[in-house]
Image (cartoon, helix red, strand yellow):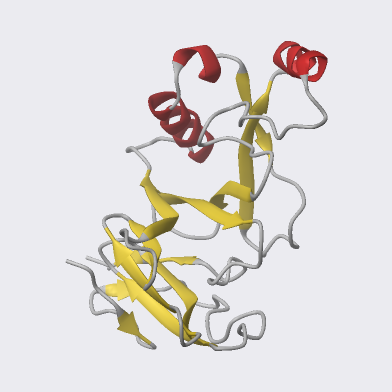
Amino acid sequence: MKQMLLAMLLPFAAIPAGAQTDRPSREPVKGCQWEKMADAKVGLALWAQRCDFGFRKITPLFQGSSFAIQYSDSGGGPDNLIDVIDQLPDEAPQATLKRFFYEHTAADVRNRCILAEFRGHAAMPAGKQRFTFVPNAVYEKELVAKADPNEVPEPACGEWGEQPEGIQYFEVSTKTSARKLLFVRVGQDEPLFDEQTLQLIEPAAK
C-alpha cells in the first residue's frame, strides 16, 4: 500500500532532534510545489516536489522500501529514486554497502570494483557520508585503454556503482540510531526531491 503523509511526523516515529527538515534547501521548479513527506515503514522523511505542467503531472510517493515518482504520461509504474537499505545487527555501514553491492552485482564486475568516497555534486550535509563503487586500478587501466571517445561507456561497476552519465551514490547518516542506509539517484538534472535534507526516521523508544 502506497502511503503519503504530508507535513507531519508519523505516529510511533521520531526524526532526530536538530535535523534541518523544516524547509527545503532550494526553490521549487516552476510548476511544482514542495511537500514534506514521511513514511515510518520505509524509514525516510524528505521534501519532494509535486508538479503540474498541464500536459504532465508528477506525483511523489513511497512504494516498497523506496521513494519514487510517477509520471502521468509514462504509461508505466513509478520510478524509484531513493532506496532504503537495512543494516544487519552489529554490521558497520561500510560493511553493509559492500554486502549489498556484492549481492546485487555480477561476480565478474563486483570483484573488480572498490568502495570509494563520493565526491562532487553539492556540498556534503552535516552528519552525512557519501560513497560509490569505482573500478580498481587494474580495471581502470583496461577501461581507459579500450575507451571510445565517441561513445558513452557502460557503467563499469554496474547498476549500483559510479555512472558515466548521471549522479548516484550511497548515503550514510552518522548521527542517527536508525540502522538504515540510502541509495540516492540524483540523475543528470536537479532532482525533484531535496537530496540535501534527507532524514532517516529513528525507531520509536521502547
Is residue 107 placed above or below 174 in the rendered structure? Answer: above
Quarter of the image where one finds residue 140:
top right
Image coordinates for residue 131, horizontal then vertical, percent = 62, 42
Q: Nearer the viewer, residue 121 or 171?
A: 121
Is residue 173 in sight in this rendering?
no
Q: Is residue 161 left or right of residue 148?
A: left
Image coordinates for residue 80, horizontal then vertical, percent = 40, 56
Is residue 170 placed above or below 140 in the rendered structure? Answer: below
Q: Nearer the viewer, residue 157 or 76?
A: 76
Image coordinates for residue 162, horizontal then vertical, percent = 64, 37
Image quadrant in which the N terminus is located: bottom left
Is residue 130 placed above or below 193 in the rendered structure? Answer: above
Identified at 64% across, 39% down, the residue is 163
Q: Nearer the viewer, residue 140 or 182?
A: 140
Q: Is residue 37 left or right of residue 19?
A: left
Is residue 157 placed above or below 132 in the rendered structure? Answer: above
Identified at 39% across, 78% down, the residue is 37
Query: Outermost residue, front direction?
Result: 55
> How many numbered callouts?
0
Is residue 81 in sight in this rendering?
yes
Identified at 64% across, 50% down, the residue is 167
Quarter of the image where one finds residue 195:
bottom right
Quarter of the image where one finds residue 132:
top right
Identified at 75% across, 47% down, the residue is 119
Q: Nearer the viewer, residue 64 or 77?
A: 77
Image coordinates for residue 58, horizontal then vertical, percent = 43, 76
Image quadrant in which the C terminus is located: bottom left
Q: Is residue 145 left or right of residue 98?
A: right
Query: Outermost residue, left direction?
Result: 1
